[in-house]
Image (spheres, rainbow, N blue to C red):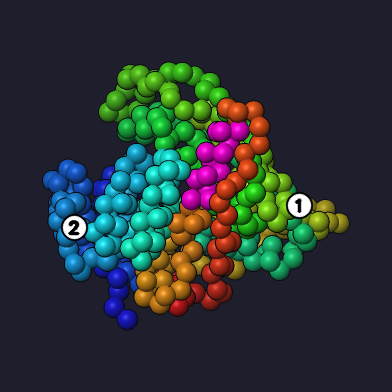
Amino acid sequence: MDKIKVGIIGTGNISGIYFQNGSRFDSMEVVACADLDVERAKAKGAEHGVRGCSVEELLADPDIRLIINLTIPQAHASVCLQALEAGKHVYVEKPFAVTREDAKRVLRLAEQKGLLVGSAPDTFLGGGIQTCVKLIEDGWIGTPIGATAFMVGGGHESWHPAPEFYYQKGGCPMFDMGPYYLTALVAMLGPISRVTGSARISYPERTITSQPKYGQKVQVEVPTHVAGILDFASGPVGTILTSFDVKGGSVLPRIEVYGSLGTLQVPDPNGFGGPIGIWRHGAKEWSEIPLTHGYAENARGVGAADMAKAIQTGRKHRANGELAYHVLEAMHGLHDASEQGKHYVMESTCDRPAPLPLGLRDFELDA
């Protein structure tokens, strides 16, 4: 079966891993890239052995069937819509869109056109989260009762070369890192029925201390400390904290899931592998569990490759628009709940993504 030909739009920092992995999968091949800065696209294309061109040229290429959209969050929806109008399937970096309204427009157009749409994060397809999914399904911790998820740090202005967008609409710790944590939780526990939370802007102005913008001031437009409660439709109650305001260290776990028979320690959902611990009822300490699945190294792009396999076979892809919209709505719901002082009842739902089967080789997907 011929590989699906892929074009990348957006050649910034994150594009490197997509180029590196893109053509290693059995279902897709990156053949071109585009950017508003055409010269940057040509340079990036030459670096990775693909054609660099304008966005218009890439979308006009009849051989390219799938677009990977790696633009900044504020452009995610518009570029997705442009790609769908050109008759291309599209996979976008997280978040799915900045607003719920824009995300709905993308989903509606994809349905009208009979095209697939998907979104990062795809880290839940890594060996770490997939092993946790299997452990929960196999009853290792009994019936899930609750979960905690924590992502805290001091913000991106100390290391990122252009950190401004993290403090603008579509940025913030929840929209930057929340997709990894919420998607992992939905993959393990299923969809969310309602949320509530509190959020604040702790520092209205940030100073960039990284190069090349050292000393520049950033006005903060979005909450930078968000604490929330998640009620899952299947019963568990979750807690989530995302913050760019923690100036010291932290010993919080990334994710833990609590069940009637024990506790599951889940690895960092921003990675693909990582250690997994189980503390079963009656035990005296943690037991480390080996990974049951592959994709333990940086496999970014596996979600797009799974989508390409779905194009080839007609099955449902896992990092799909339905899941991405559900996560986006939950993030907005946490902010809405804080502003309105009440629970936010989710309007959307989604299927829990089908687990990957055992025995897949890296860069291989199931039919």
Residue 87: image quadrant is bottom left
Mark found first going from the N terminus, 2 or 1: 2
- Which circle marks residue 58 in the picture? 2
Q: Which residue is mark 1?
A: 145
Q: Residue at x 32, y 49 (%)?
A: 70
Q: Residue at x 49, y 74 (%)?
A: 360
Task: Look at the picture and state if 241 lies above or below 323.
Answer: above
Name of the residue lying farthest toward the front: 112
Q: Is residue 207 magenta?
A: no
Residue 76 lies, in percent from the top left, at: 34, 46
Residue 306: image quadrant is bottom left
Please name whichever residue, 321 or 360, is drawn nearer the observer in this view of the structure: 321
Q: Residue at x 71, y 68 (%)?
A: 138
Residue 332 lies, in percent from the top left, at: 52, 38
User: Can the viewer see residue 252?
Assistant: no
Mark 1 neighbour class, 10 Å CA radius: few under 14, some 14 to 19, many 20 or more: some
Name of the residue lying farthest toward the bottom: 1
Name of the residue lying farthest toward the right: 282
Task: Look at the picture and state if 178 lies above or below 309.
Answer: above
For the record, the magenta segment spans: 325-337
Residue 143: image quadrant is bottom right
Mark 2 neighbour class, 10 Å CA radius: few under 14, some 14 to 19, many 20 or more: many
Residue 268 lies, in percent from the top left, at: 56, 49
142 left or right of 321?
Answer: right
Amino acid carrying label 2: it is Leu
Q: In which quadrant will I find the N terminus?
A: bottom left
Amino acid carrying label 1: it is Ile
Q: Main secondary structure of the magenta part?
A: helix
- Which circle marks residue 252 in the picture? none
Q: Residue at x 37, y 71 (%)?
A: 311
Looking at the rendered structure, the secondary structure element under dot 2 is helix
